[in-house]
Each structure stands twice: as C-alpha cells, then as structure tokens.
Amino acid sequence: GYRLVVANLGDLVPLLCLRDGSVSELFRPHRSDINKSADGSGNVEEAKQAASALAPAQESWGGSTPSSGGPSGVDQPPLVVGGQDFPWTRTLGDLDVKKSPEGAGRLFAQPDVRVVSLDSSHQGVALVSWDLYKAIGSTSTVSTIFSKSGRRPRFAAGALVDNGLQSLGEAQNGHLGALALLFDQVKNEDIHPAKKAKSSQPAQQVRARHILLKHRECKAAHDKVRHKQVKRTRGEAERMMRNVLEQCAADTTKKLFTQKCKELSECTSCLSAGDLAGDVGWMKLGKGKFGAQFDAVAFALQVGELSDLVDSDQGIHIILRSA
C-alpha cells in the first residue's frame, strides 16, 4: 500500500487529518522559547515539563516512533535545560538552541521520522508554522477547514492562514505559513478491469466556466468588464476568491456560481446570458487561452466539480467543469 514518510524540520507542525474529523500531531516542534519559563528565567522544573510535552509519543494510528535520545552507544550527559537531546533538523532557525548552553541536550544527526501506512480513512496532511499553530489555537479548526476543502489543498492552506490572521488581528507578529497535502480516495480494487480501464480514459475535450479575479501582478491588470485598472494585491485577490469558492462549493445547484460570476468576474465571458456566464466553450488539452495550468485543472475535474484556486498570467480562477 501507500506510505507517508514525514521527517521533521525546524518549527513546522505536521498534522495528520482523517476523514472522520480527527487530527493528530505527528511531531511538536522544538523551540527554545517553549523551553523557558513564563518569565524567561529558564527555570529548570518548567523546562523539564516543557520538554516532556514535546517528547515524541507512540501514536494509535501506527507508524514508527523515532528515538528521542542521542546516538546509540554513547553515554548521555546530565540534561537540565530542555531535558533531552535534539536532532539538528529541529533547530533550523533557532540560534538559542545551537549555542548549546551548559547542561543543555546535545544535537545529533538522526532526524525525527514518522511513517504512516495510508488507507481510505486518511484525508491529508497540513504543515503549519509554529506561530500559525499557536494563533489557530486547536486542531478542531484544522479539522473544520479540511472538511470544507474537498480536493482543494490551496484553499485549505490559505484558509488556515486566514484563520490565524483573524485571531491575531492587528497584533500579528510572526511567520504565518501553511502547506496542505490532500489524498485522493483509495480506489476500489474490486472494480472489473474493463470498467476500470474505461473510467480512466482521459477526456478528449471538456467544456468549462470560470470566475476570474485579477491582481496588480497580472500580465494585464485591467478589468475589461468594468473598464478600470485593478489595484488589489495577489493576497487580497486570493482571500476574496477563497470566500467565493467556499460559498459556491456549499451550493449544489450551482446558481450561486452564476451569480458570483456576474458580480465579480473580470473576464468578459461573465457577460454571457444565464447559465453560460463565465463559459469558455469547449477546450482541447493544451489549446486553451488561459495556459497549461488552467487546462490541466479543467481536464482533471469531474463534470459539475469546482476547482481549487488556479493561477494564470491573467489572474486567479475558479473553474467549473460543465461538460
């Protein structure tokens, strides 16, 4: 079967998300600020408690548990500050740990690695910066976002950052970043080979509709529908489109897609009447006018399925495959 191998680097928090809504921390990051007392004094007992909370634990979902000590066969020195040795891969960007104060744990070359045997219960993995994880506050937020994301990892990663920014408000001070990886459903191996081969044949052409929102980094940052210059940033455009995508994904009738297309899209195709709003016509792979990425996503969709956010030199798109 398929396996997921995760090696921990720096202060990223890898979160394993299951389709039942549960979320597991594959690792907790090592940060020197976690190992200090609340008043920054480096109290020994508080440091030991912090280190204990960070120690890798055996997870119920299976996989290997890394060694938490130093190289085998070597006598360990007394550990006071931090309470344990750390692999060097968990000190990236943390100069306080690299200074190795007297009595601290040593650095060793063996990284923390987890191996997870994947099955249909696994939905995906989120790699979240420590600052963002603190801002989000709980794994329940991650679970909620992943449940809304469908097969849209870019939406999931952006929504995590949006949530962190919303929690911090104007006090935002840190590095907020996230990366999402979503797994396709495990295919049914009982399907007859002839039916499986037929269903896996790629379409020769597809028909699609789209909503386009431009930003000032576009090749032509001009809204031809409303005849005005586009001044929004890429980040602002992405946040607007994530909001549109979330609303449209919840509407099974696809009527909201037509409404939002007419209201917001900056492609002249939005002027088409009725359910043809946003229609780009029949497309052949590699011959569409919005570039290879747009074509690849459109051909990968099922009929009636909405895409994730898609980049082109024209701006950011949401694609709906109509036929």
Image: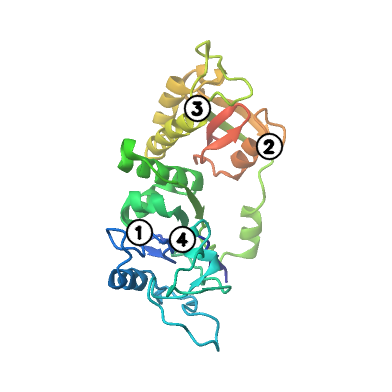
Tag shown at residue 96: 4
The residue depicted at 42 percent of the width and 20 percent of the height is 263
First along the sequence among labels 1 and 4: 1
Image mark for residue 233: 3
Task: Please indicate, yes or no, whether residue 106 appears anywhere in the rendered image.
Answer: yes
Query: Which amino acid type is shown beneath numbered disc 2?
Result: Ala
* Mark pair 2, 3: CA separation: 23 Å
SS at badge 4? helix
C-alpha gap between disc 2 and disc 4: 46 Å
Q: Please report contact status of discs 2 and 4: CB closer than 8 Å, yes or no.
A: no
Image location of residue 13, percent across then percent down: 44, 59
Instruction: Tell me which numbered mark, 1 or 2, is placed earlier along the sequence.
Output: 1
Residue drawn at x 39%, y 30% as measured from the top left = 256
Q: Which residue is mark 1?
A: 21
Observer able to see residue 188: no
- Name the residue rendered at 36%, 65% in the picture: 35
Question: Label 2's element?
Answer: helix
Would residue 313 appear left or right of 49 to someone viewing this image? Answer: right
Label 4, label 3: how far apart the Cα atoms are: 36 Å
Q: Nearer the viewer, mark 2 or mark 3?
A: 3
The label on residue 292 is 2
Crowd tier of the residue under label 4, counting other residues whose Cα lies within 10 Å: few below 14, some 14–19, many 20 or above: few
Marks 1 and 3: CB-CB under 8 Å? no
Q: CA distance from mark 1 to mark 3?
A: 34 Å
Q: Which part of the image, by quadrant, shows the N terminus?
A: bottom right
User: Which badge, 1 or 3, comes first in the chain's sequence?
Assistant: 1
**Is residue 78 shown above or below 44?**
below
Precedes in sequence: disc 2 or disc 4: 4
- Looking at the rendered structure, the kind of residue marked 1 is Gly
Q: Secondary structure at mark 1?
A: loop
Q: Are marks 1 and 2 in contact (CB under 8 Å)?
A: no
